[in-house]
């Protein structure tokens, strides 16, 4: 249907008629022209009829211009039928560790070792692309925790923010408690009850103002569920200092605090997962992807399209025709 944003503009429609009537009443006091004989005017009756038609046409065009401008001023718009937006109602806050240890190259993709953050980006990016209809936010943390993207439906922009994040930009240490605290602060503003934090790290909390256990208690009080993921291989072969003795085996995930991550998840009725390679990491996110959606009122969108330009176009065409009439009559008058 068509709606009017400023319908009071139509009250200006009779303004030209009121002005004309006021001027006509002001002229009524003037004496009329007395003509003793109609003889000199008989031959010009045909010209007067043509002039009368010409003036009426110009008056009609002037009214068309005025009405079109008033219609444009009233700002008509077409409003379509309500469209229900596809929302599942889940609010997911992703907390991704980008500390210096995420540069460890112990993740194998296509037969080559890559750093942990590269593998995480590939898996999480695919996970985000499947969350159409969900609100997803992104927190990057190292020594400090930063809100990189608030809860949003714009998953493409969020994914770009994640892919562009370099290792160590947030500091070389790991503030797990601060990351959870920041995520809780953002999710606390949401009215619904079912909210989820997915925290991924490869280390232990060694810096920050908030203890991870305290942060998880705050999350539990706000009924926020936390899924924790520990990433990193548990075995890595490195060249020995003495080449003749072969390679030495090390544990690149020795600093991973699985106990604390498990306690965080259990405190909030979540779960802890261990990802030793990209395949396992993808399986974990696929499992989280099957969470039951939270019930939420569907958001309704009504498409709107402005129609003022049609009225303005009509006014321009009428004005063009108004001036074209005078240009057309001038050659005729000169021929006569």
Image (cartoon, rainbow, N blue to C red):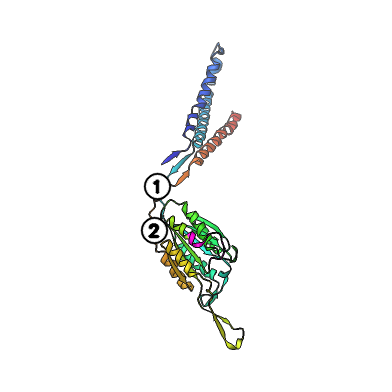
274, above or below 238, in the image: above
- Where is residue 149? Give x, y as percent: 53, 57
Q: Quadrant of the N terminus?
A: top left
Q: Which residue is mark 2?
A: 293
Q: Nearer the viewer, residue 310 or 11?
A: 11
Q: Which residue is mark 1?
A: 82
> Residue 103 appears in which quarter of the rendering?
bottom right
Disc marking residue 138: none
**Label 1 packing within 10 angstroms: few (<14), some (14-19), many (20+):** few
Residue farthest toward the top in the current orientation of the protein: 36
Depth check, mark 1 against mark 2: the one in front is 2
Rounded to the nearest whole Å, what is the CA distance between mark 1 and mark 2?
23 Å
Q: Nearer the viewer, residue 124 or 60?
A: 124
Main secondary structure of the magenta stretch = loop
Helix, strand or loop under label 1 = loop
Residue segment shown in magenta: 204-215
- Where is residue 47? Give x, y as percent: 54, 24
């Amino acid at each position: 249907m068509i709606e009017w944003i400023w319908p009071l503009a139509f009250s200006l429609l009779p303004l030209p008629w009121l002005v004309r009537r006021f001027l006509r009443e002001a002229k009524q006091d003037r004496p009329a022209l007395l003509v003793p004989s109609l003889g000199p005017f008989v031959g010009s009756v045909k010209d007067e009829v043509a002039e009368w038609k010409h003036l009426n046409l110009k008056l009609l065009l002037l009214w068309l211009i005025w009405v079109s401008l008033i219609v444009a001023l009233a700002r008509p718009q077409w409003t379509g039928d309500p469209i229900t937006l596809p929302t599942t109602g889940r609010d997911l806050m992703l907390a991704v560790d980008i500390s210096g240890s995420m540069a460890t190259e112990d993740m194998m993709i296509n037969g080559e070792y890559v750093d942990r953050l590269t593998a995480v980006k590939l898996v999480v990016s695919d996970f985000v692309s499947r969350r159409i209809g969900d609100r997803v936010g992104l927190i990057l943390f190292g020594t400090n925790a930063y809100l990189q993207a608030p809860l949003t439906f714009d998953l493409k922009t969020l994914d770009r923010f994640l892919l562009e994040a370099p290792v160590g930009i947030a500091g070389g240490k790991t503030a797990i408690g601060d990351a959870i605290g920041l995520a809780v602060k953002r999710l606390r503003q949401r009215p619904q009850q079912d909210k989820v934090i997915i925290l991924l790290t490869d280390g232990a909390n060694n810096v920050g103002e908030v203890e991870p256990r305290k942060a998880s208690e705050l999350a539990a009080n706000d009924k926020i569920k936390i899924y924790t993921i520990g990433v990193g291989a548990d075995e890595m072969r490195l060249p020995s200092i003495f080449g003749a003795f072969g390679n030495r085996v090390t544990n690149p995930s020795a600093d991973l605090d699985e106990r604390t991550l498990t306690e965080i998840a259990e405190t909030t009725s979540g779960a802890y997962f261990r990802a030793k390679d990209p395949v396992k990491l993808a399986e974990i996110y696929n499992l989280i992807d099957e969470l039951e959606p939270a019930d939420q009122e569907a958001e309704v969108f009504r498409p709107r399209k402005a129609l003022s330009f049609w009225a303005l176009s009509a006014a321009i065409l009428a004005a063009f025709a108004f001036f074209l009439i005078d240009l057309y009559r001038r050659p005729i008058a000169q021929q006569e």
